[in-house]
Amino acid sequence: MGQASEPRGDAPIRFGTSGWRGILGEDFTFPRLRLVLSAVGRWLGQQPGGGGEVIVAHDTRFLGERMAALAASAMHAHGQRPLLARGAVPTPVVARAIRRRRARAALVFTASHNPPDYQGLKLLGASGGSLGPDQTLRIESLLRATGDEPAAAPQPVRSLDLVAPYLKELLAVVDRTPIARARLRVVYDAMHGAGAPVLTSALTSLGARVRLLRGEPDPRFGGAAPDPVPERLRELSRSLRAARGLALGLATDGDADRFAAVDSDGRLLSQTQAVALLVDHLARSGRIRRGVALSVAAGSLVEKVAQGHGLSVTRHPIGFRFLSRELGSGAADAAADESGGFALGSFSADKDGILSGCLLAELMATLRSSLRKRLAELERRHGRSECGRSVQPLNPRSLEALASLRAAPPARVGQHPVRSAAMGDGLQLVFDDGFLLLRASGTEPVLRVYAEARSARALAQRLAAGARLLAP
């Protein structure tokens, strides 16, 4: 078998923090995809047990259905038993199906929150969580040794509805009684992604009255990235301000593994605030008993809330795959990252924006008041935590600036002395009142700036200072 060669002019195929992603037709092409699928098939064949069931799925992005069919044929050619998910489905539905069916793995065609011109392939392992770096590096090594194989002939593939059993299992985790009694209204912005029918059905079954925004499947996502960040959720905030009675705003990204929440006053909760509320609620109700795994960029309020309930907290590099490992091993009952990812280990090892939204609905209905009332209690006990992120251009100058900062971290940023500097994933500067993290994205050609401070004004200043450091 001949040595693999990259298509001329294309960069090497690399798996980032959440699979392989690239611009469709430029980086993510059918010839390159066939090479990747061959490497994945060979990797699966090397695992103990040989062949087994492999779930193949896609979300609402361009060519997802065609790529899933190609992947199913490729897995069959490599001795696996592919099972094709019926229709476009959210990634959390697939993650849960792996655990239910005891499948060996899953291939999900999604680029999650990335812009609409992207496509991607996310690989989930037998635990239901993303493959770890050792596994993806092995697939990359097989990719370099994969020759030009003939295209796999189409094979009859069994398809199955994965949504119905997911909903049944989800509804067993969430307490529907308070939601129905509170006559909760939910405005849900699906951002034209795969979560629309699933979260809508779940909330309705729980007794909530749901108004759906941007629920139609659209591979262009309305012309912008399906990322639930503040600038994309203005209509959701306006809808909450106009709503009557007890109301909650929810949003999910393109494949519904990320979530965002808007309180009844129309104000968007930060990811740190939303996760702190979830951890507090689940600890109070006994559904988190051991520990919580957090990314290094998650805000300190989550950690303090967890510790206040006697829970252990561990920190991990950015990328939910590191958190999935903690959930899969039983070291943690819950996990959260800095960008809207939350998982409850008893349900799934991967982040689940659908479950997160339902649990927040349960919390608000239990409180019979705004989420900020409970948040204010947590902040009085543990202190305020304002967290945010921004994007900066990736170019030779900004990369050089980041490399220089890593080689010689600043002693202070503005008026704030740097207490410590960590050189893991990028550069993290720790202050008395928060942090500043600078790193290259693992899913897009951009630099990301993450920050925490004790007030919204201080947070804006810190994010601006981070941008200046990358553009001297």
Image (cartoon, rainbow, N blue to C red):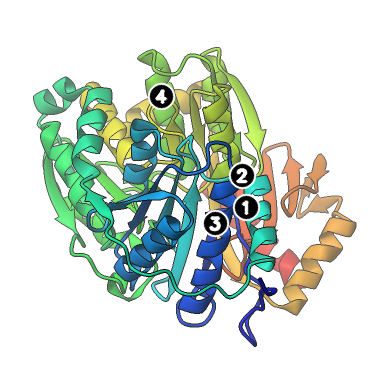
Quick check: 213 above or below 175? below
Which label belongs to residue 40?
A: 3
What residue is drawn where x is 73% and y is 72%?
398
Q: Nearer the viewer, residue 171 or 159?
A: 159
Q: Where does the image place residue 319, in percent across and percent down from the top left?
A: 58, 47
Instruction: Tell me the amino acid under the disc marked 3.
Output: Val
Which circle, 1 or 3, is nearer the viewer?
3
Q: Earlier in the sequence, mark 1 or mark 3?
A: 3
Q: Earlier in the sequence, mark 3 or mark 2?
A: 3
Specify the quadrant of the image occupied by residue 131: top right
Q: Where does the image place residue 466, in percent across and percent down from the top left?
A: 68, 60
Q: Earlier in the sequence, mark 4 or mark 1?
A: 1
Q: Which residue is mark 4?
A: 346
Instruction: Tell me the amino acid under the disc marked 4.
Output: Ser
Question: Seen in the image, is 131 located left or right of residue 340?
Answer: right
Quick check: 310 above or below 342? above
Q: Where does the image place residue 451, in percent across and percent down from the top left?
A: 62, 49
Q: Label 4: state its secondary structure.
A: loop
What residue is drawn where x is 90% and y is 57%?
408
Q: Nearer the viewer, residue 73 or 462?
A: 73
Q: Residues within 10 Å of mark 1 (few under 14, many from 20)?
A: many
Kindly report the distance in space between the C-alpha atoms of the residues bearing marks 2 and 4.
20 Å
Instruction: Tell me the amino acid under the disc marked 2.
Output: Gly
Q: Residues within 10 Å of mark 2 (few under 14, many from 20)?
A: many
Q: Label 3: state its secondary structure.
A: helix
Q: Which residue is mark 2?
A: 132
Instruction: Tell me the amino acid under the disc marked 1.
Output: Thr
Q: Earlier in the sequence, mark 4 or mark 3?
A: 3
Q: Where does the image place residue 174, in percent across and percent down from the top left?
A: 25, 25
Which circle, 2 or 4, is nearer the viewer?
2
